[in-house]
Amino acid sequence: MTQYVVLSAILFTIGCVGVLTRRNAIVVFMCVELMLNACNLAFVAFARQHGNLDGQITAFFVMVVAAAEVVIGLAIIMTIFRTRRSASVDDASLLKY
Amino acid sequence: MTFWLLAPIMVAAALGILFVRKAVHAALLLAVVMISLAFLYAVLDAPFLFAVQIIVYTGAILMLFLFVMMLIGVDASDSVVETIRGQRAMAVVLGLVFGAVLVVGLGQVTLGTVVGLDAANEGGNVPAIANILFSKYVFAFEATSALLITAALGAMVLAHRERLTPKATQADLAAQRLRDYADHGKHLGPLPSPGVYARHNAVDTPALLPDGTAAESSVSRVLAARGTVRSAPAMADDIDDVRRQLGGLDGHSDPATMPETSGKAGTPASTEEDEK
């Protein structure tokens, strides 16, 4: 069972580094999804470890919330792209000034 | 066994997301990770989540990603300019440290014996999940419906654009075209069509101007931005190659060595006979 959790940790780390290094807002978003998926894997693995289904229910809720989050996030990215003509996270810097 | 097959694929695909330049490739690599994850769920006695993972994540969410990507332009690739100096290197170091801490920490944990889900999945995984979902977690489930409605409304509000200026009619467009012609002599008619050649006939090939240069206005702006426009002179090299393969080294081969040419010469005569 440890190997599943280790895989989950590796995927989470990769997603984390992706969020920090990538500049395209959509790819950043994909890395966030990768992190959510890594957490789901840990939840499902621990559900099997402890022999109850609460972990699977939690993973299910994470998927639902992720779906809602993707809808809103992509709508925001589209709005930013429409006004600024760019999907780069560096260009949305007006709050700095 | 399935795990050791899938885990390297997943890690490689996830690392690929970090390095590929194009967002579409990242989406496809993410699809690989997600489908592999679905199979891991199946191995972990979670057939319901296996189906949900494929339907919701790979089907709906990734499609949405690709959809938005096509809307805002596939050519929007990453910039390599660092706005904060050394941020990339710092992020990689931080990631390595974080991953090492997690993996080393997990390596020292003993999780005990695996209980397994055979008892919990007694009457099937889906009924068991439904039993918990609609009793213990029914309140969270109801809250989820509110969340989904809010998300749908929010997406509609965010994606909606109020028209501030009236839509240009056909008369307006025609007047604008004539004004352009009067002001800076822009051609009135339609744009030139892409090139039609003996060996290639597609929208990605520019037409040639009388002086032999490519007419840039004959290919789509989107194709030019993606950098997938073919060059017509390169196709001429191709023709020379084919000629060389057919026999004549100098390009002027005699018809006797090319039987298909003589065959074609015979066809018009037969059609004339048919018409009679």
Image (spheres, coloured by chain):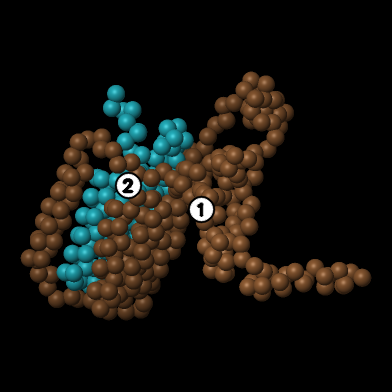
**Quick one: quadrant of the N terminus of chain B?**
bottom left
For this rendering, which residue is in front, B92 or B184? B184
For this rendering, which residue is in front, B69 or A3? B69
Which residue is tagged 1? B234
- Chain letter of mark 2 equals A
- Chain letter of mark 1 equals B
What is the x, y in percent for residue B170? 71, 32
Q: What's the residue type where badge 2 is placed?
A: Val
Q: What's the residue type where badge 1 is placed?
A: Ala
For this rendering, which residue is in front, B121 or B267? B267
Q: Residue at point 30% right, 57% down? A: B16
For this rendering, which residue is in front, B180 or B136? B180
> Chain B colour?
brown
As helix, strand or loop, the secondary structure at mark 1 comes to helix
Q: Residue at point 30% right, 50% down? A: A32
**Quick one: quadrant of the C terminus of chain B?**
bottom right
Location of residue A81 (image quadrant): top left
- From the image, state whether disc 2 or disc 1 is nearer to you: 1
The answer to whether residue A40 is visible is: no
Q: Residue at point 7% right, 65% down? A: B108
Which residue ends up furthest to the right in the rendered image?
Answer: B276
What is the x, y in percent for residue B207? 60, 45
Q: Is residue A64 left or right of residue B105?
A: right
* Residue count near mark 1 (Cα–Cα under 10 Å), binned few <14, some 14–19, many ≥20: few
Disc on res. A28 = 2
What is the x, y in percent for residue A52? 25, 70
Q: Residue at point 44% right, 45% down? A: B75
The answer to whether residue A17 is visible is: yes
Q: Are marks 2 and 1 in contact (CB under 8 Å)?
A: no
What is the x, y in percent for residue B34? 35, 63
Chain in cyan in the render: A
As helix, strand or loop, the secondary structure at mark 2 comes to helix
